[in-house]
């Protein structure tokens, strides 16, 4: 079969697999978020957790909220994209001293490895939680760049990929 016929066949098969996605509607077909229940979506009650930090201390979400206006969780893989996000996030850390910013390392297999990644990446001064069993990753459906903001009442105010920080700034300004 010639390469042109092969490409056309692949295109036809690929497009037939799309079916109704070729003419999307403007309606949001995601299920509605149920507020007042424990979950990871905006408006839901944030699931509590306890994780060890890279400095061998333990952090519990409910304890952090008892002493802060809110908590920001940022899921990092210590890659260049995460470095860019975390560098940008430092400005928010300085502007919101009563918000606890916690990096969540969900890729390293030990507290020691997480601390090594943290220090070698230049984030010695930030709190890093080590999610060895992927507990928080699963609770919040987090992955690289996911940013979660929980207010002092324990309600999720943001759960999305960190893009340019504008949304984070808007959410943080509403916490005070």
Image (tube, rainbow, N blue to C red):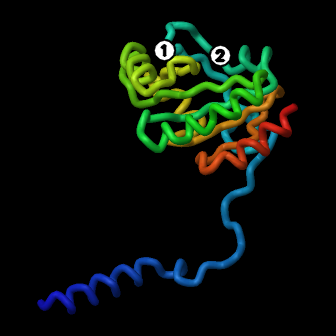
Label 2 element class: strand
> Residue drawn at (67%, 29%), measured in percent from left and top?
47
| Residue 88: numbered disc | none
Residue under pointer 2? 60
Q: Nearer the viewer, mark 1 or mark 2?
A: 1
Packing grade of label 2 (10 A; few <14, some 14-19, many >=20) is few
Residue 40 left/right relative to 22: right
Q: Is residue 113 left or right of residue 41?
A: left
Q: Is residue 71 left or right of residue 144?
A: right
Where is residue 39? Give x, y as percent: 68, 38
From the top left corner, tell me how far across and down residue 117 is, in percent.
Answer: 40, 24
Q: Quadrant of the C terminus?
A: top right
Spot occupied by residue 119 in the image (x, y as percentages of width and height): 44, 19
Q: Residue at x 62, y 14 (%)?
A: 59
> In terms of sequence position, does the residue under pointer 1 or pointer 2 come before the other?
1
Q: Position of residue 170 (x, y in %)?
A: 79, 45
| Badge 1 vs badge 2, beta-carbon distance below 8 Å | no
In which quadrant of the rendered view does residue 85 lie?
Answer: top right
- Residue under the image location 45 percent in, 22 percent down: 118
**Res 20 quadrant in image:** bottom right
Identify the element where label 1 is drawn: loop
Q: Cα distance, mark 1 to mark 2?
A: 14 Å
Q: Nearer the viewer, residue 30 or 159?
A: 159
The residue nearer to you, when weighing 93 against 70, is 93
Residue on which disc 1 sits: 54
In the displayed orientation, state which residue is furthest to the top.
56
Q: Which quarter of the figure is the N terminus placed in?
A: bottom left
Picture quarter containing residue 88?
A: top right
Please name whichever residue, 103 or 41, is drawn nearer the observer in this view of the structure: 103
């Amino acid at each position: 079969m010639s390469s042109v016929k092969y490409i056309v066949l692949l295109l036809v098969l690929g497009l037939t697999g799309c079916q109704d996605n070729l003419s999307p509607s403007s309606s949001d077909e995601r299920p509605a978020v149920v507020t007042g229940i424990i979950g990871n979506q905006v408006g839901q009650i944030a699931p509590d957790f306890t994780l060890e930090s890279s400095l061998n201390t333990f952090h519990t979400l409910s304890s952090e909220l008892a002493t802060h206006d809110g908590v920001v969780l940022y899921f990092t893989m210590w890659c260049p994209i995460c470095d860019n996000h975390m560098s940008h996030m430092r400005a928010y850390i300085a502007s919101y001293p009563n918000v606890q910013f916690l990096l969540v390392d969900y890729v390293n297999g030990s507290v020691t490895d997480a601390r090594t990644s943290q220090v070698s990446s230049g984030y010695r001064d930030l709190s890093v939680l080590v999610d060895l069993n992927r507990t928080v990753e699963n609770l919040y459906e987090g992955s690289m760049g996911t940013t979660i903001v929980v207010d002092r009442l324990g309600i999720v105010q943001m759960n999305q990929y960190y893009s340019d920080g504008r949304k984070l700034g808007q959410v943080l300004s509403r916490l005070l």
